[in-house]
């Protein structure tokens, strides 16, 4: 990522911390190299952040993982949670399941609303139903509703009474988030992901005419 800030000198770390072991220092260095050189490689970044978070490898310079992500990489807790969640779910797919796996953030993002252990079934079902391999927004949302049981839990009046204004607000938020991701991909010279993001925006705006990326 362009404009990566250097690590601060213990500006937000607590007064006393447990020093990193040589092994942990090597682990942190390897993870940060992955993040810095592969911001467009979504799942690898997620796995690296997961190691840093779970091992508290940020503790030499920061008192919290959230502060580390903000100061070191310039993104907030929600983005870090998404990439970590995506990496965790991808790891749950059996290696020999015979089903193609997600290749970028936006293919897996809608599934993050499901419990992690429900993801493999939902993903495999969506891929199975996809015509010519195309995962449309409507298909993905239908599978998620079925797996989560949302349709059965909602009272009849709530199934079709959501205000149009609310839908528009949600759509605008999604589009703005996607535009931000497209900008990051362009800055990282990841043209394929940027184009795929634009396809997703088109799908949201025009009712599924493009594929979910």
Image: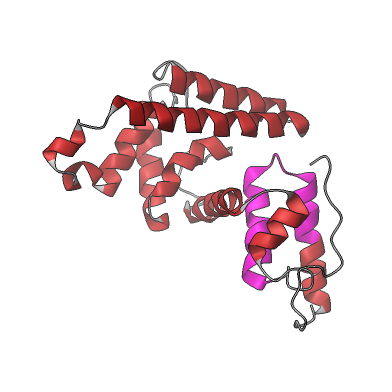
Place of residue 178 in the rendered image (x, y in percent of width and height, measured from the top left): 57, 31
Toward which corner of the image does residue 6 lie, by quadrant?
bottom right
Place of residue 149 in the rendered image (x, y in percent of width and height, measured from the top left): 23, 47
Q: Nearer the viewer, residue 34 or 63?
A: 63
Place of residue 137 in the rendered image (x, y in percent of width and height, measured from the top left): 40, 28
Toward which corner of the image does residue 161 lie, by quadrant?
top left
| Residue situated furthest front in the rendering | 165
* Residue 72 vertical position relative to residue 168 in the rendered view, above or below: below
Residue drawn 70% across the image and 71% down it: 63
Residue drawn 70% across the image and 54% down it: 70
Regarding residue 108, the answer to whether it shows in the image is yes
Residue drawn 26% across the image and 42% down it: 146
Q: Is residue 54 inside the magenta stretch? A: yes
Answer left or right for 145 relative to 207.
left
Q: Nearer the viewer, residue 199 or 8?
A: 8
Answer left or right for 88 relative to 148.
right
* Residue 83 vertical position relative to residue 49 in the rendered view, above or below: above
Dominant SS type (magenta): helix
Q: Is residue 20 inside the magenta stretch? A: no
Range of magenta residues: 30-56
Residue drawn 41% across the image and 42% down it: 123
């Amino acid at each position: 990522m362009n404009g990566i800030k250097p690590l601060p000198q213990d500006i937000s770390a607590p007064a006393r911390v447990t020093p990193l072991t040589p092994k942990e220092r090597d682990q942190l260095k390897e993870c940060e190299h992955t993040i810095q050189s592969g911001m467009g490689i979504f799942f690898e970044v997620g796995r690296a952040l997961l190691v840093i978070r779970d091992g508290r490898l940020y503790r030499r310079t920061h008192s919290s993982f959230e502060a580390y992500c903000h100061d070191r990489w310039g993104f907030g807790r929600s983005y870090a949670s998404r990439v970590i969640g995506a990496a965790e779910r991808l790891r749950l797919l059996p290696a020999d399941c015979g089903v193609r796996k997600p290749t970028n953030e936006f293919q897996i993002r809608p599934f993050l609303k499901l419990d992690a252990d429900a993801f493999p079934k939902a993903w495999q079902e969506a891929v199975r139903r996809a015509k010519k391999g195309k995962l449309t927004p409507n298909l993905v949302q239908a599978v998620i509703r079925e797996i989560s049981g949302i349709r059965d839990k909602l009272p009849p009046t709530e199934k079709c009474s959501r205000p149009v204004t609310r839908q528009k607000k949600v759509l605008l938020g999604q589009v703005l988030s996607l535009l931000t991701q497209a900008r990051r991909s362009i800055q990282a010279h990841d043209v394929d992901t940027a184009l795929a993001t634009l396809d997703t925006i088109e799908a949201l705006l025009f009712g599924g005419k493009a594929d979910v990326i």
